[in-house]
Image (cartoon, rainbow, N blue to C red):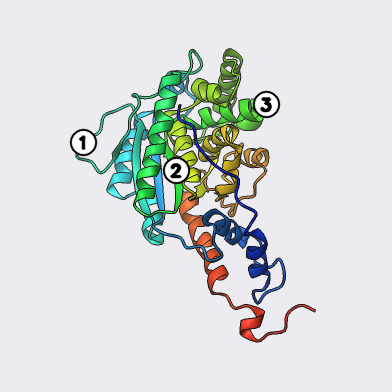
């Protein structure tokens, strides 16, 4: 697998950026989490960051673990939802249109074939992963292939002038993968990591949790890459590679909900400095997401209890990132406005 170069953000500009923020016509510390203005400046290594050509990429794939009844929906829905994305009818389409965000959809491993004429990134590794209750979800070679294809997708987008990118997903069964990854890499009981996904009832949730506990006992893993091979989905692995490439390219990385955060957990376990490039967009209503954000030690911008995926949290949080950059660049200072500062 290729290696990524993700340096820690330079502290050289931090004092100057913080001073610029403190001199704005507001009390010290006001505007709270819009301190992401400072983060954007550090990522771009400038006192005047600019957001160019925002993109969201939705990665889609199927999961063999759905054979065990861990989802309320059949795997065919993944394919059907990809077609919905491509026809412009999903929530993420609506939000991206509203915010002027370019939306791309990638077939990472859907259990069906798409016409080559469709406006789709054809990056399929295989037609779904294996059932990780019985065997590893993917081989090491497949995981590497997915990571590298995700990396290339981001590299191609970056080459078009984009410097802020978010990632979403679609994959029936992928909350099972995310929960297993969270449990193993976060060293947490599976009960704290497993939620209702597509809408399981109490009995189905109990069964899902028991299946995941058995799967975790089946696979011994030594590191994040092995855990990804054992439990991950192709969309999760591809998203991981895409996130790593985005950080290497000094892009602002928008992290969506539970599945995207699980992919980020893998990426962060491999390259901890990626966290410095990430903006965590929202806290999902999925049961494990709050705990996963705690494991990562981060605070999300929004808490709308969405439980949808698709990158919708990224699209809704993007205007806040825009607002942060705008106040840094356009808001008057006490000096320029002729207002007395704090005594």
**Label pair 3/1, CB-CB below 8 angstroms:** no
Question: Residue 328: where, in percent of width, then height?
Answer: 57, 68
Query: Which one is in front, 298 or 331?
Result: 331
Q: Quadrant of residue 144?
A: top left
Mark in front: 3 vs 1: 1
CA gap, disc 2 and disc 1: 22 Å
Residue 305 lies left or right of residue 11; in this view the side is left
Q: Earlier in the sequence, mark 2 or mark 1?
A: 1
- Which one is nearer the viewer's eye here, 237 or 179? 237
Q: Can residue 296 be seen in this view?
A: yes
Q: How crowded is mark 1: few (under 14 residues within 10 Å), some or many (20 or more)?
A: few
Quadrant into which the N terminus falls: top left
Q: Residue 168 carries which label?
A: 2
Residue 343 x, y percent position in the rendering: 80, 79
Which of the 4 image quadrants contains residue 179?
Answer: top right
Q: Which residue is drawn at 66% across and 80% down?
A: 334
Q: Which residue is drawn at 54% across and 35% down?
A: 267
Q: How crowded is mark 3: few (under 14 residues within 10 Å), some or many (20 or more)?
A: some
Q: Name the residue under label 3.
A: 189
Residue 343 shown left or right of residue 94 in the figure:
right
* Residue located 40% across and 22% down the image: 142
Q: In the image shown, does 43 or 196 lie closer to the viewer? A: 43
Q: Give the residue at mark 1.
A: 116
């Amino acid at each position: 697998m290729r290696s990524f170069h993700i340096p820690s953000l330079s502290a050289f500009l931090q004092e100057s950026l913080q001073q610029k923020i403190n001199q704005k016509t507001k009390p010290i510390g006001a505007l709270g989490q819009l301190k992401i203005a400072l983060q954007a400046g550090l990522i771009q290594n400038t006192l005047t960051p600019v957001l160019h050509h925002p993109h969201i990429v939705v990665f889609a794939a199927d999961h063999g673990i759905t054979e065990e009844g861990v989802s309320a929906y059949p795997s065919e829905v993944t394919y059907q939802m990809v077609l919905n994305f491509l026809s412009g009818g999903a929530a993420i389409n609506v939000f991206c249109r509203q915010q002027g965000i370019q939306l791309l959809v990638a077939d990472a491993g859907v259990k069906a074939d798409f016409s080559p004429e469709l406006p789709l990134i054809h990056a399929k590794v295989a037609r779904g992963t294996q059932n990780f209750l019985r065997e590893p979800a993917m081989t090491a070679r497949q995981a590497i292939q997915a990571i590298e294809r995700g990396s290339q997708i981001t590299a191609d987008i970056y080459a078009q002038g984009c410097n802020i990118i978010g990632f979403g997903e679609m994959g029936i069964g992928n909350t099972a993968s995310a929960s297993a990854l969270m449990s193993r890499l976060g060293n947490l009981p599976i009960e704290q990591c497993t939620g209702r996904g597509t809408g399981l009832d109490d009995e189905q949730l109990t069964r899902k949790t028991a299946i995941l506990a058995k799967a975790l006992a089946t696979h011994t893993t030594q590191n994040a890459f092995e855990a990804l091979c054992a439990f991950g989905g192709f969309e999760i692995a591809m998203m991981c590679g895409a996130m790593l490439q985005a950080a290497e390219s000094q892009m602002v990385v928008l992290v969506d909900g539970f599945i995207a955060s699980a992919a980020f957990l893998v990426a962060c376990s491999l390259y901890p400095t990626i966290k410095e490039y990430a903006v965590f967009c929202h806290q999902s209503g999925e049961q494990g997401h709050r705990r996963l954000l705690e494991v990562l030690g981060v605070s999300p911008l929004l808490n709308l209890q969405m439980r949808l995926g698709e990158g919708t949290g990224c699209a809704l949080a993007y205007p806040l990132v825009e607002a942060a950059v705008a106040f840094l660049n356009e808001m008057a200072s006490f000096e320029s406005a002729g207002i007395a500062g704090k005594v």
